[in-house]
Each structure stands twice: as structure tokens, then as C-alpha cells.
Image (tube, rainbow, N blue to C red):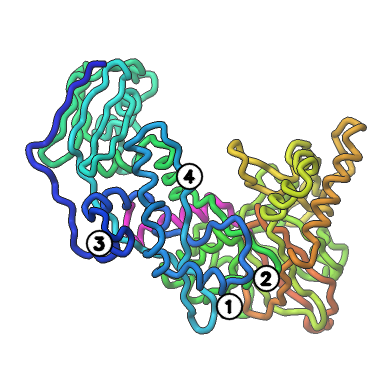
Amino acid sequence: MSSRTASPSTFHPLSLSHTDTLLTALVGKRNRRQNIAESWWPFLIWKHSLVAWREPFRNVDEYIALLALPALQRSTAAMACQALRACRRPGRAAGPLPSCLTSMHLRGQHTLGSASLPLAHHSVRHVRALDEERMMEVEWEDGGQSLYPFTWLRDNCQCPLCTLESAQARKLLMSDLDIHTGVNVVEVTNDYKVSIVWPDLHTSVFDAEWLKKRCFSAAARQAMQEELFLNKRHYWDSKLRIPTADYQEVLHDDKAALAWLSALRRVGIVYLKGAPVEQGQVARLAERIGYLRLTFYGHTWQVKDKYMANNVAYTSGRLSLHSDYPALHFAPGVQFLHCINQAEEGGESEVVDGFHMAEQLQREDPEAFRTLSSLLVDFTDTGTDYCDFTLQSKKCIIEVAADGRVERINFNNATRDSVLDLPVHQVQPFYRALKAYVDMMNRPENVVTYRMMPGDIVTFDNWRLLHGRKDYISRRDRMRHLEGAYLDWDEVMSRLRILRASVHGNI
């Protein structure tokens, strides 16, 4: 194996100021300088995350007490070092990286917050080109190592000819990329960046932090994906105390908005209190994120008992647990419901964690899980509202990602079509599986019941939660009235990332 190496004439010292106290608590007698470097990268996951536990806690107080920030500082050193060590020892598998929760009580409400931990800066000790493997090896000051393929490095050159910095977009065309390129020179510059001269004499310069975040080890990639998408969830049952925030604070304070959206992603439901008791508040809340999702029911919609209703929600009868709009191929990801008037009697809301129920079904009845995650079911919706519509879609009740994660629940018994595009021998197994899943969701120990009052807004994950409503009786002069709206997860996650950068700084 041939290689060429380069190193700076001096080493860039790591700052040991306010990080010393934290790292002493984390690692005890181990070398501080090494652990600053080893620990910073996995903290990217924890810095803004809330909860990621696979089993439900008995209540919110339990996980608040268990996972307060001092406990985070005392207990996570070994796991914090794990991702970076995978860079140093290629091929060694790392275990799953946890996320941590902090919480504070504001005005007597349970409000989930995020921990901000200091990050250390990395500098490069050596770089060398591994010509046979066609990779560049970086040795970091702490002793860790990372490998970067030549082709990936050339494809991601950050110079103005190759990247439009104002849009953070690639200008280099795939048709112009030599996927078999070698390198002429790799070296560390005086300001501790990595410089590469390519065979055509084009030069690329990479910041050390930029490279470190993009390390190709399994643990580092997992850390980056969690930082970008917050895929880990906190599962819950009937003992959940729904996270609560103040409507006005969410509208006007970035930290409150970040805590709201982070909890919405992790837990799946957040209650907002103190909204004006008039229409238009869900639109104001949506503007805090971006924009509303327009559907055939309009930008917003009024949930009332209506004559000749075009949706079962617009009646006073009981609504079984369901997700909204599976008849659309891309169902809305997030739903807002604002209580303007409550029923005189009844009308309590119900929610269940569909992801948790899917996991439980997979554990208790694997065959039912396989059926609901593999067979396509027809959904339909027909009527006139914002405009006339006739919708058809085909979806699995339980959608599973390539890595095995449950990523979406599609179930609405009212709009499940009588058309069932299955071979006749699969019909009964389908009904058996669906009945098992629905019965599991309706177990009292799995359902959270709450009663909305005027001024309350509930925000929830429509891809994950199934929601319902008990039947009700309203006065004619004061009918039960909720205003609803939809958003997509793309807009919500975009705002979450922007708020995170605003509150905690760019990562």
C-alpha cells in the first residue's frame, strides 16, 4: 500500500476553559484533552434532543426525574466516546446512541427543553493519500482516524467553481465528475485545513470540522442522521401527561418554539394553552413554522355538527381512532386543532401512539404485523368542500422504512374502501390482522383521554398518532366548534432546524 503523508508544523491547542468542569464529571481520571476531542461529536445528537426511549415510562415526572441534565453530565461519558472511536478503529460496530431529556416546570406546566453542551474544536494531525484504496486518511489530534474516498471529496469540493455558497448547492455537474480520480497532493495547511491538489491541478480545501461531521464510520453516520432528522421517538401509553406549552410564548420566543417542535417530533403530541378564543389561531401558529397545507377541505376547516356532512368528523357521533387523510398518497404530517367552543356533554378527545402499538403488535403477533406492513389497502374520499373531489390511494396500514423502523400509520376506518385489491385467500388474514391491531389500540392502558377547553390547541403527528372523539351533545346556540389545519413534516423539520441554529448556533 502506497501512501503520502503531511502534517502541520505546530499543533492547534484545544480550548480547556469551561469544558474542563463538564468533562471531569463525565470521565473522571481519564485524560481531559483526549476526552474533549472524543466526546464532542456524539453530543451533537444530545445537544438538542428530548427523548428517545423505546419503552414507555409510567409518567412524564418519571422521565423528567431520571433524565435531568445533571444525570446527563454524570452518566454519558462512555457512550459519548463511542462514535469517535469507531472512526479510529474502522470495522468495529458501535451500539445505538442514546438521546437525553431535560425538563423544566414553567407556570406549573410540563415543558420539555433541550440541553446545550459545549463543543470542542478538532484539528488535524496528519493526512495521507492511500492510493490503492483511493481514499484519504485523516488522523485527528486526539488520535482518531477517518477515511474519505477520493471520489466523494472531489464531488464535494467547496470552492466557488464547484459550490454555490449562497445556496449551499453543488455546481459541479455529475457529467464532469471523474469517479476514478486520483490525487496529486494532500496536505494540512497552516490554518489546519486539508488541501487536495487533483490531477487536473484543481485544488480543494476542506475545513476540519466540516470533514469531521461527515466521517463515514457507522456511529458517526448514525449520529448525523439523528441530528438531521430526529428519528428516535419516546413511546407512551395511557399514563402519558401530554407536554404543554404557552401559545403566546411559542409565537414570540424561539426557545419556546424549539422546545415545542422538538417535543412534537419526539413525543408526537404537544398541548398549547392560552390561544384567543376565535378563528384564525391555527393559521397564526402555522405561520410560525412556514405555511399551511391546503387540502380539499380548505386551508383551515371547521369541525362542527353539520347538516348533510361531507365527513364523519362533522357529526356529533363517536369517531374511532384514526389518522387523517390516508386517501391522499401523501397525507399531511402534522395536525392542529383549536377548541373555540366545547360540547355541553361529551366530546372528549382520545389519542394513541400508533408507532408504539405497531411495535407491540410485532412483538405479540408477528404475523399480523407482517400482513399490515406488506398488503396494500385501498382508501377513498369523495365530496365537495374547497372544491369537489374523488380521491383514491393504496397504502399499507403500517409503513416500514428500509431499516425496519415504523415510519407511518395509515388507517381511517371511515374512508377504507370497499374495494379490496387482494387475492381472495388473503382477505381473511387481512381482517384478522387489522382487528388485532385495532383491538390493541383500544385497550384502556394504551389510550390517552383529554377534554379540550376553549383556547386550547392540540398539535400532533398525523403520521404516528391515531386520534378519536367521544360522541357529544351541544346546545343549539353554542355548538361544539374546533378549527383545524394541516402542515407537512418537511416544513416543520425545516423550521425546527432553523430554530435550533438560532438558539444554539450552527452545528
Residue matched to label 2: 239
**Which residue is label 1 attached to?**
273
Left/right placement of residue 424 relative to residue 348 reads right
Distance from the alpha carbon under mark 4 to that under mark 2: 30 Å
Q: Secondary structure at mark 2?
A: loop
Residue wearing tag 3: 19
Specify the quadrant of the image occupied by residue 109: bottom right
* Quadrant location of the N terminus in the rendered image: top left
Q: Nearer the viewer, residue 228 or 297?
A: 228
- For badge 4, the amino acid type reads Gly
Q: Residue furthest left?
A: 9
Q: Which residue is mark 4?
A: 95
Type of secondary structure dominating the magenta stretch: helix
Which sits in the foreground, 304 or 441? 441
Other-residue count near label 2 (Cα within 10 Å), few / some / many at <14 / 14–19 / ≥20: some
Please check the rendered image and state whether residue 57 is part of the magenta-colored stretch, yes or no: no
- Are the two marked residues, 4 and 2, in contact with CB atoms closer than 8 angstroms? no
The local secondary structure at tag 4 comes to loop
- Is residue 280 visible to the viewer in this orientation of the structure? no
- The type of residue carrying mark 2 is Lys
Q: Marks 1/4: CA distance? A: 40 Å
CB-based contact (under 8 Å), mark 2 and mark 3:
no
Question: What is the distance, in whole Å, between disc 2 and disc 1 at their CAs?
Answer: 20 Å
Please identify, in this view, whether the residue under mark 3 or under mark 1 is nearer the observer: 3
Q: Are marks 3 and 1 in contact (CB under 8 Å)?
A: no
Question: Bounds of the magenta span?
Answer: 485-507
